[in-house]
Amino acid sequence: MLDLKSLIPFHHKSRKVAKPSDAPREPFLAFRQEMDHLFDSFFNGSALIPRESAWSAAMPKLEITDGEKELTIAAELPGMEEKDVDLKISGDLLTIEGEKSEESEKEEGERTYSERHYGYFSRTIRLPFTVTDQKVDARFDKGVLTIKLEKPAEQQQGVKHVEIKSA
């Protein structure tokens, strides 16, 4: 007959740590690994849980391109307009902030359905240089904010290509 107390870990005199090779003898190890996998999938996104959640939608996706003379940052802000976005630069920190509010109302007979969505985001990026008197250009087009920052003169030096010779 199986003693139920033997299944409860804190009733054991010695605390053996299960190793992966002990999997067939440790039924709870497989269960724990499966639960760990489930939680990892939940927080990292998986086929069952889409990556596009309310949390990720609040943060704009960025594409940063480091050119020879300028740094270009493109932020995806779908459904937003230029007036909803604020751009600030302080030293080597660039901050993009925005707020979106959306309301819709639909009437069906005697019933009225209304929905309101509000969202605020703030994303700060540390730049590889301090912005002082360099040229900064920001444009908003079809939900994409593109920021071009001229690099300081000392960082605009061209890339030196080194010839590789055969031995």
Image (cartoon, rainbow, N blue to C red):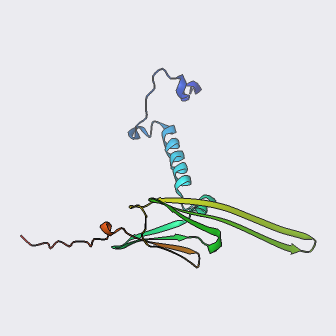
Quick check: 57 left or right of 12? Answer: right
Instruction: Residue 53: tell me if it is visible.
Output: no
- Total marks shown come to 0
* Front residue of 26 and 163: 163
Residue 5 place in picture, x, y as percent: 57, 24
Q: Quadrant of residue 60?
A: bottom right
Residue drawn where x is 36% and y is 67% of the image:
152
Left or right for 41, reference 92: right
Residue 109: tell me if it is visible: yes
The residue under the point 62% across, 74% down is: 82
Q: Quadrant of the N terminus?
A: top right
Quadrant location, the C terminus: bottom left
Residue 118 in picture, x, y percent from top left? 71, 62
Residue 38 or residue 109, whichever sits in front: 109
Q: Is residue 36 left or right of residue 120?
A: left
Which residue sits at x=56%, y=53%? 42
Q: Residue at x 51, y 51 (%)?
A: 40
Q: Position of residue 119 (x, y in %)?
A: 67, 62
* Whole-percent x, y for residue 51 in the image: 56, 62
Of residue 105 and residue 141, the one placed in the foreground of this image is: 141
Residue 36 or residue 6, whichever sits in front: 36
